[in-house]
Image (spheres, rainbow, N blue to C red):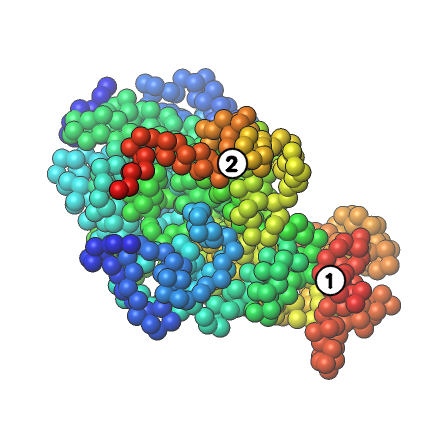
Amino acid sequence: MRLDNPAAADELRTRLINENKTFTRRLWVCGGPGCLAAGAAGVFAALADAVAGLGLAGSAGMSCELSGCLGLCEKGPLVQVEPEGWLYAKVTPADAPEIALETLSKGELIVRLLDDPKIPLKDDHPFYKPQRRLIMSRMGRTRPDSLEDYVAAGGYSALSKALSELGPGEVSRRVEASGLRGRGGGGFPAGRKWAACRSAPGPVKYVVANGDEGDPGAFMNRSLMEGDPFSVVEGMTLGAYAVGAAEGFIYVRHEYPLSVARLKKAVGTAEERGLLGENILGSGFSFKLRTVEGGGAFVCGESTALMASIEGREGQPRVKYVRSAERGLWDRPTLLQNVESWANVPAIVAEGPEWFKSIGAEGNPGTKVFSLVGQVRRSGLVETPLGTPVGTLVDGAGGGARPGRTIKAVQTGGPSGGCLPREKFDLPLDFDHLPAAGTIMGSGGLIVMDDLSCMVDVARYFTGFLSGESCGKCAPCREGLTLIGRILDDLCRGRGRRGDVLELASLGETLSRTALCGLGQSAANPLLSTIRYFAEEYREHEEEGFCRSGRCQGMFVPEIDADACRRCFRCAKVCPARAATVKSKREPPEIDLGACVSCGACLAECRFGALRAAPKKKTGETKARESSKPTPDDSSEAAAGRCSQAEARTGSQKEKKGPGSKRRRS
Amino acid sequence: MSAPIETMVSGTINGRTVAVAKDTPLLQAARDNGVGIPTLCHHPALPPDGNCRLCLVEVGGKLAASCLYPLREDGFSVVTESGKIAGARAFVVKLLLSRAPEDECLLRLAALYQTAPDPRLAGDEDGCLRCGRCVRACHAAGSDAVALVGRGRSRKVAGAFLEPPADCAGCLACARVCPTGAVKFRETKNSRSIWGKEFSLAPCPVCGRTVGTPEELARAGLDPGGALCPECRRRAMAGALLALPENAAPKRG
């Protein structure tokens, strides 16, 4: 049925809310990416069978549905029980009959299925305690592909209000006054874009959503697009109405097939119901929305490259001296925002800017979804007000380090973000404090690293990722990142040379200033932030060829602390070189350093922190390496010394012709 | 340029007040006012791309690529030489030298900005700076035969599917604009080869001088078999004009 006037949406909502009141109890199986990967589809099928078998569905007022993401991915598959608010963790299909019989039909709690037997309520769980879910508010209580569920949960109240009473100017004003900042990473005031695009001349304008999430370990946009696609669609409709656009594009990552399908379905459903397309809600306003699948390159997440990709050109950034709001897609004024920014819009328009500003921190209103991953006890999606300290997420929601480990750092903002050390965990997560500490908000990735993560290796990994994903358009990013990556490679293989770290810092800073696009300008963040906060690890790599984290192969030896060792002998079992031998059940294993390949497998296996990485004893080989290094008092030959080292290496590379080899001959 | 006065903007370049038409690229404004800025990927006949980053200057204290930066508002303050700029250019030259360590222009810049190639980038010296001038020239000539393909450090200029480009007309526009001479071609009296393709060369039916490849002549709408060379064409046209009755020399006295 088409909704042909603004009041029709509100009438539908009232009717649906009354209908939903007939439910006595519902089970929501989390259908987020984490739980689906853990087998939620099987759990859902088994539950649906069990519920049907007991004849509970339909007239009995009970149901079992697949919902959007509940966030606690580590403990998936999750099942939420309404109205009690219980949360079952690590549910298997075998648990389904019991859940259907005991919980759904009798209302009994199954303690065995709780993550913590003392905490039955989801809202009391430490993972959810620090959270405030706005973007994810509907996830866990609506079916993602159901327009009815979205409307019943308050959806489309903003659009009907905008079309019936507010008008485009007021919609734009509300977003401007809300102080919303771009959730894609930059934190640019959204209102400024809206105002600029609204006042830009020209009959043709576009709105675009960026759903090309490509950061390793990040999946908040994916969860949003899969779990609440209508919020993105409604937000974009409001944006188009405010700036006067008749056409819009959702650029979705091709590798997110479920996101693509859900968004397409949402767009189709909204069109059928008169919430998109011609004459929306009978108001005369028309807006056509299309989904575009991404080109597969990381750089396509950069706004100008994204627009080039929509236009059918190669996804390459352009210089942004003229903003997209003025000249964007096909050189027309374009309002481009991240999907999470768009999802904020309906609530801001419906509830007003003052309400939005009451959440979050000064100058950083609202909430942000973070994907908390890495070496923590509880990984998942966490939504907190902006300005929440890093530690609240890592130690509170995340539950701190895994057994036997200590947390060393957290990387914020995805691959081009920086690493914050433990001492900085009281830093508020917002768009102002993070850049001041040498990192970025990015799209909200939080990768937690423990004492087994080598920070030089972390910089090497992310530099390698970015160098591989560099589009190659500008020289600093294309060649500069390669050079930085090679120096870091050397450091992580014990081939570091005096002055490398200093040179890295200088290369990184110059790269940040000279690269063409935002990705290139931020590409040195992992390097620069780790040099800033973990200088000692860099020094050890450069000068001593030692990796204290036991990560860089061949740059440490394992050492057992006999007091901490609990004689579990797991280390001996995992050793690929059979260098650890168990002589007696009462003694720690003996490690034969001659056989040890210093791979670090034993360190990672120990749950008691009894194994640590120690510097290698100087053997003949390492001594030779040391002595070939130019010493500081060799200063007259310092520069030449560097060259000779470099030549030695170029020479060893199959005598490739290069400036190095040429100079050696002279 | 006769821009109306209200579309002029003024500001300073290296402390000197200048006024230019609104939206003039900074590089052009500087050069028009006698201030030199080094460039590599820029070519006056091609649209700017801003990829080599050599033309970076300071605008209000921040680095900007002058070839693309439009002067849009009054009160701009541009500095074209500073320690920061020299550092940035030295970085760019150092990196590009790893591709073309023997290029004279780059070596002059290396001497100017006191930098040398880093041996750790050695091994990929193909002479090409990936500046894309050839690609832009090919597009402007109407062929789009070559493009920059691949990404990151494996990016290079090539035809589609890395094959000899079907659309190449052998016009040499690419080779003519290459700043380092990395676009290689061979030419004899009757043939030319470039991008792995062989072309015959059509001689001018009047003077016998090489006019171009038949493909190139066809692309320009000329007779691929017997087009005149530019000089003979001018001569022929002038002759035709003189032959018109109204152009007959007036009889004197």
Q: Position of residue B195 (x, y in %)?
A: 62, 37
Q: Position of residue B124 (x, y in %)?
A: 68, 51
- Count residues near mark 1 (Cα–Cα under 10 Å), then give few for <14, some for 14-19, many for 20+: many
Q: Residue at x 45, y 22 (%)?
A: A48
Using the numbered discs, state the Cα–Cα distance from disc 2 to disc 1 in whole angstroms.
Answer: 48 Å
Q: Residue at x 58, y 37 (%)?
A: B209
Amino acid type shown at disc 2: Cys
Who is closer to the viewer here, A214 or A575? Answer: A214
Q: Which residue is mark 2?
A: B229
Query: In the picture, residue A542 is in which quadrant?
Result: bottom right
Q: Residue at x 78, y 50 (%)?
A: A575
As displayed, is residue A173 above or below residue B251?
below
As displayed, is residue B151 above or below residue A487?
above
Question: Which numbered disc covers residue A168?
Answer: none
Q: Position of residue B148 (x, y in %)?
A: 55, 41
Q: Which residue is mark 1?
A: A660
Q: Residue at x 41, y 51 (%)?
A: A319
As displayed, is residue B53 above or below residue A290?
below
Which numbered mark, 2 or 1, is in the foreground of this view?
2
Query: In the picture, residue A204 is in which quadrant?
Result: top left
Label pair 2/1, CB-CB below 8 angstroms: no
Query: In the picture, residue A541 is in which quadrant?
Result: bottom right
Who is closer to the viewer here, A564 or A463? Answer: A463
B191 vs B80, left or right, is right
Q: Secondary structure at mark 2?
A: loop
Question: What subunit carries mark 1?
Answer: A
Is residue A33 in sight in this rendering? no
- Quadrant position of the C terminus of chain B in the picture: top left
Q: Secondary structure at mark 1?
A: helix
A607 vs A228, left or right, is right
Who is closer to the viewer here, A103 or A27? Answer: A27
